[in-house]
Amino acid sequence: MSYPVTFLGKALQIPENVPHPDNNTPIDFSDPADWIIYIVLPIVAAILVLLWMRKKKQDKTK
């Protein structure tokens, strides 16, 4: 009796159309979009945050 309930419970918990580690592909750095998304945007975001923090710190001292 336990086997059908366990199998049914596990089958109902597997999400559909969601990326899984077994069907993902590695990042292809020959594609410019991957460079922009994974390299350029994080660097730009980090620079903007650092500039914002510096400006915020300078505003507190004035």
Image (cartoon, rainbow, N blue to C red):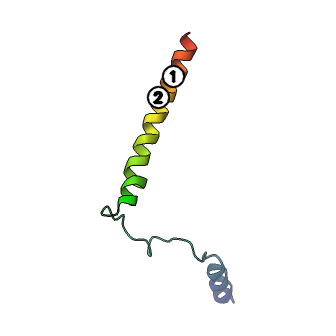
- What amino acid type should be assigned to the residue bearing mark 1? Lys
In this view of the protein, which residue sits in the foreground, 16 or 5? 16
Q: Quadrant of residue 61?
A: top right
Residue at the spot 39% in from the left edge and 59% down from the top edge: 34
- What amino acid type should be assigned to the residue bearing mark 2? Leu
Question: Eyeballing the image, is 23 above or below 34?
Answer: below
Q: Tell me where residue 14 appears, x and y as whole percent.
A: 60, 77
In this view of the protein, which residue sits in the foreground, 3 or 57? 57
For disc 2, the neighbor class at 10 Å (few under 14, some 14 to 19, many from 20) is few
Task: Give yes or no for contact between labels 2 and 1 (Cβ–Cβ under 8 Å).
Answer: yes
Residue 26, which numbered label?
none
Q: Is residue 29 left or right of residue 17?
A: left
Q: Number of numbered discs present?
A: 2
Residue 55, which numbered label?
1
In this view of the protein, which residue sits in the foreground, 16 or 28? 28
Q: Return the residue at label 2.
A: 51
Residue at the spot 56% in from the left edge and 9% down from the top edge: 62
Residue at the spot 62% in from the left edge and 85% down from the top edge: 7
Residue at the spot 66% in from the left edge and 89% down from the top edge: 4
Q: Secondary structure at mark 2?
A: helix
For disc 1, the neighbor class at 10 Å (few under 14, some 14 to 19, many from 20) is few
Q: Secondary structure at mark 1?
A: helix
Q: Is residue 16 left or right of residue 47?
A: right
Question: Eyeballing the image, is 30 above or below 53?
Answer: below
Q: Quadrant of residue 1?
A: bottom right
Could you give the CA–CA distance between mark 2 and mark 1, rounded to whole angstroms? 6 Å
Q: Tell me where residue 49 appears, x and y as whole percent.
A: 49, 34
Q: Tell me where residue 8 appears, x and y as whole percent.
A: 66, 85
Q: Is residue 22 left or right of residue 17?
A: left
Question: Eyeballing the image, is 11 above or below 43?
Answer: below
Q: Tell me where residue 16 appears, x and y as whole percent.
A: 60, 77
